[in-house]
Image (cartoon, grey):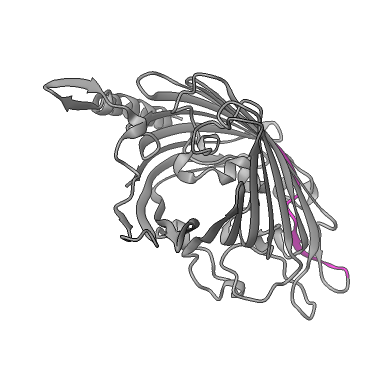
Amino acid sequence: MKRIIALFLIWIIGFASFAQEIKEEKKGDTKKADVTNRPFGKGIINYTASDNSWSTKMTLRFQALYSVGNNVSPNFGFTDSYSNFMIRRARLKFSGHAFSPKLKYKMELGQSSRDIGGFVDEEHKGAPGLVFDAVVFWNFAEGFNLWVGQTKLPGNRERVVSSANLQLVDRSLLNSNFNVDRDIGVQLHHKWSLGDPMTSFVMKEKFSVSQGEGRGITVNNIGGFSYTGRIELLPFGEFDKKGKDDYVGSSLKRPQTSKFVFAFGGDFNDSASRTHASRGKFMDNDSERGYYTTNISTLFIDLAYKYKGWSLMSEYASRNAEDAIAKNTDGTGTGQYVMEGKSLNVMGGYLFSNNWEVTGRFTTVDYKNTYTLNNGSSDVKQYTLGVSKYLAGHNLKVQADVSFKETNGKDDGILGRIQMELQL
C-alpha cells in the first residue's frame, strides 16, 4: 500500500510540473493547445495514388506500463507482492482503400511479447499471434457495409473500444471473462436515421458469422460457426460527425448536447471447443477428434453517455453453456469447464478544462460454476479509481489507476498501474 501511494504521489507531482499546459507559439503569443486536434495519430506514412485508385496510412503506437500490487488468498491468508515494467502493447496499423474509396481495408500487427505470446498450441501451429486485424470493408450500398476477414466481433462495447482509446489503464473484469474478441468470418453492418444523423434518432444493426475459434486458427473448423448480433439505438443522434466517438473513452470532444446510446446483442457459438467460447483453452478429450464441444450463449447489454466533460459507460454480460463441464467419451470429467456466469460493469468520469480527468469504475462478477473454481471463488468485486492527463487526446496521454479487489467478501489484493500511450 505504501509503495502504491508513493507511486501515485510521484506521478501526480512530477507529471503536473512537466505537462501542466501545452503551449503553441502564434504571432509571438501563447495559447492553450487544442488537444483533440494535435498532429498525433495521423500516421507516419500517408500516400494516395495520383488517380485515387488506392491509398495507405501506416500508424505506430505503443504503451509503456508499470504495475505494482499484491495478491491475497482469502482462504489461506498468504500475500504475494509483485512489480514489473512492461511494453503492454506495440502495434503497427495499416489502413486505406483499394480500387475505390468504397472498398477500404485495415491490418493491425502486434509487435510486443505481450501481443504475440501465448499461441503455443497445435491449433495455431505454435506460431506467434502477429496478425490482430486483416479485414476489408465494402460500402456496397447506402448505409450498408460488408466486412470480410479477421477483426473484432460486434460484442460488448468495452471490447470493441480500441485499447488506444481506453479511459482507464486497461479494460474491466467483465471484459476479460466474457468478451468474444476477434474471429475470422463475415460481418454485415447497417445504419439509418430519421433525419439529420447528428440530431435525430439513429439505429445501427451489426451481424456476423464467424468460425467460432478466435483469431489465428490454422486447423479446420472444430465445431460449428459463431453467430453474433448487435443493435444500437442513439435517440439524440451520433456522438460526432464520423459516428465513432461513442466507441472512444472519455468526453474529449465535450458535446454541448446530451449524447446517449443503448445497445443489446449476443453471441451463439455452435459446438464451441474453447473455455471462453471463441477464446480460452481448447477443451481436449479422448474422442476421435480430440475435442469436447458444447453450445455456448453470451448476452450483452450496454449504454454510453457523454455531455460536455461528463462520460458514463455501463455493461452487463451473461454466459451460459449447454453442458459446461468438459467430459471424455465415458462421461468422466477432463478438469476443464466453460467460464459461465454474469457480470456488471459501471464506469464514469469527468474531464476538467485543463484535460485532466478523474474516472471511477465498479465491476462485479458472479461465476456460475463455483465448485470448479479454485478455492470455491464465486463472487468477485473490483473498485478502480483512475487519473488521466491527455496531452494530445488519446494519441499522447499518461494514465494511472488503483484497483481494490474482493473475492467472496474478503480482501483479494490491490493493483496500482501507470501507463503512457503514444500513437503517431
Depth check: give the residue in front, 249 or 82: 249
Residue 227 lies, with reference to residue 260, above or below; the image says: below
Query: What percent of the width, then of the height, locates residue 152?
Result: 58, 53
Residue occupying image coordinates x 47% and y 62% = 116
For image coordinates 88% across by 73% down, the residue present is: 330
- The one of 80 and 290 positioned closer to us in this rendering: 290
Q: Residue extending furthest right?
A: 330
Is 341 covered by the magenta stretch?
yes
Q: Nearer the viewer, residue 124 or 186?
A: 186
Q: Which residues are magenta?
A: 331-347
**Residue 204 appears left or right of 327:** left
Residue lying at the far bottom in this picture: please name it. Answer: 288
Q: Is residue 404 above or below residue 209?
A: above
**Left-right relation of 271 to 314:** right
Residue 175 locus on image (x, y percent): 62, 44
Q: Residue at x 50, y 41 (%)?
A: 170
As drawn, is 208 to the left or to the right of 70?
right
Residue that extends furthest to the left in the rendered view of this protein? 28
